[in-house]
Image (spheres, rainbow, N blue to C red):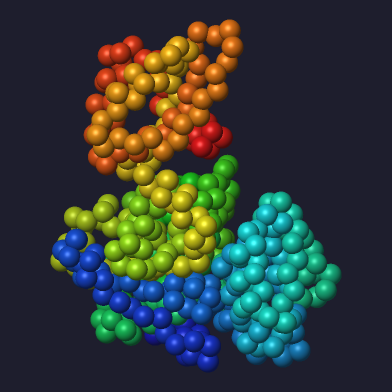
Amino acid sequence: MTQFARNARAATRALRDLFPETPLQRNDHLSARYGAEIWLKREDLTPVRSYKLRGAFTAMRKVRDARPDQRSFVCASAGNHAQGVAYACRHFGVKGTIFMPVTTPQQKIAKTRTFGGEAVEIVLTGDYFDQTLAAAQAWCAEQKAHFLAPFDDPDVIEGQASVGVELLEQLGRAPDLVVLPVGGGGLASGVTAFLRGEAPETDFRFVEPAGGASLLAALEAGGPTPLPRVNSFVDGAAVARLGQLPFSMLDWVRPDQVHLAPEDRICITMLEMLNVEGIVLEPAGALSVDVLPELAEEIRGRTVVCVTSGGNFDFERLPEVKERAQRYSGLKKYFILRMPQRPGALREFLMMLGPDDDIARFEYLKKSARNFGSVLIGIETREAGNFARLTAVMEEAGLNYRDITGDDALAEFLV
């Protein structure tokens, strides 16, 4: 057994003071669909609904063991890491100062405050996370507090490795494949470091949001490199730069082991898991399940563990998730129509719609002294193929239209 494996097992034992092991559940629905044995490691069922508590607790415990007089801890986070740190601060009875961007949703601020209670102080500063991080680190140095990094820390990585310890013990054998989400790399580096030593026959696949592929970028560049832009929808994994330490532990990964999940496709997975299985997953928590269709051929007949990393989902976002899922599935489109400004023109267009087509959005303002006006229209249908029929009819009628569904900038502005 390696020293890392011993440390990971010790971290797992210590965590039992905080919460029981999260379930490893065989999912019959997914197993039947893929002809495989699909297990879900339910990290969405920790006390803070994400695996982040493991790393925060482990790092804080080790600092306290080495320096019992250290009673002040700091972190910068807008989500799961903040909640994990807050929970650990309350457990140890130490002071936590949690820096969050001013733009953080009130729901996340309230949950962090609930988990930490009187043990934590929340400081809202900066419009962007980089500004928040700089403020937290400056304050930390001034106050001689201990900064708890979300992933680029050996003790945090040891704590995240406890996911691998538990799933191996729960399954009772080495899985054929483990599918891991990747953000900053703490979870992926910890779990793989443990399992590669204890279950060398296990293979791995890694999933990143398409708009935040920091691991793939690091592998291609030979080291962590900042992404020029990041899509923040998958907020639990949308990291602009992979951690340096996680990369040093993941540099063996082949680029073909890394899969990119489109943000809108993840929404389909989230809705399916909610509607079919009753499992609430945040976007990052759905990554490992979302990639299964791409792995269908290679996983048939095999034992696969998908780590569902978190379930901190604000149901106020549900309309957005549904909207994105419909657009990705081809069941909803937005058009700008150039329509004649004359009586009966709208009625003629409505007659072009099929029996399964429904208008979900309509905006039109008649403008004087113009022969034509622009109409923004959103249409939902039951089968994606219905749009081919509709556009063919519009073209035959000579109607000037533009499909803006795939134009992210324009669609976000208008829709």
Q: Is residue 135 visible in this depiction of the protein?
A: yes
Above or below, 226 against 187 in this view is: above
Q: Quadrant of the N terminus?
A: bottom left
Near-viewer residue (399 or 87): 399
Specify whether 225 is left or right of 346: right
Q: Position of residue 218 (x, y in %)?
A: 50, 51
Specify whether 68 is left or right of 335: right
Near-viewer residue (137 or 274): 274
Badge count: 0
Above or below, 212 against 396 in this view is: below
Residue at the spot x=62%, y=78% of the render? Answer: 115
Q: Position of residue 395 (x, y in %)?
A: 31, 16
Specify whether 101 is left or right of 349: right
Above or below, 218 against 85 in this view is: above
Specify whether 168 is left or right of 71: left
Residue at the spot x=48%, y=13% of the render? Answer: 341
Residue at the spot x=32%, y=84% of the render? Answer: 170
- Furthest toward the front, the residue is 343
Q: Position of residue 235 (x, y in %)?
A: 53, 56
Q: Position of residue 64 (x, y in %)?
A: 67, 87
Q: Is residue 258 visible in this depiction of the protein?
A: no
Residue 306 found in image quarter? bottom left
Residue at the spot x=55%, y=9% of the render? Answer: 370
Near-viewer residue (37 or 353): 353
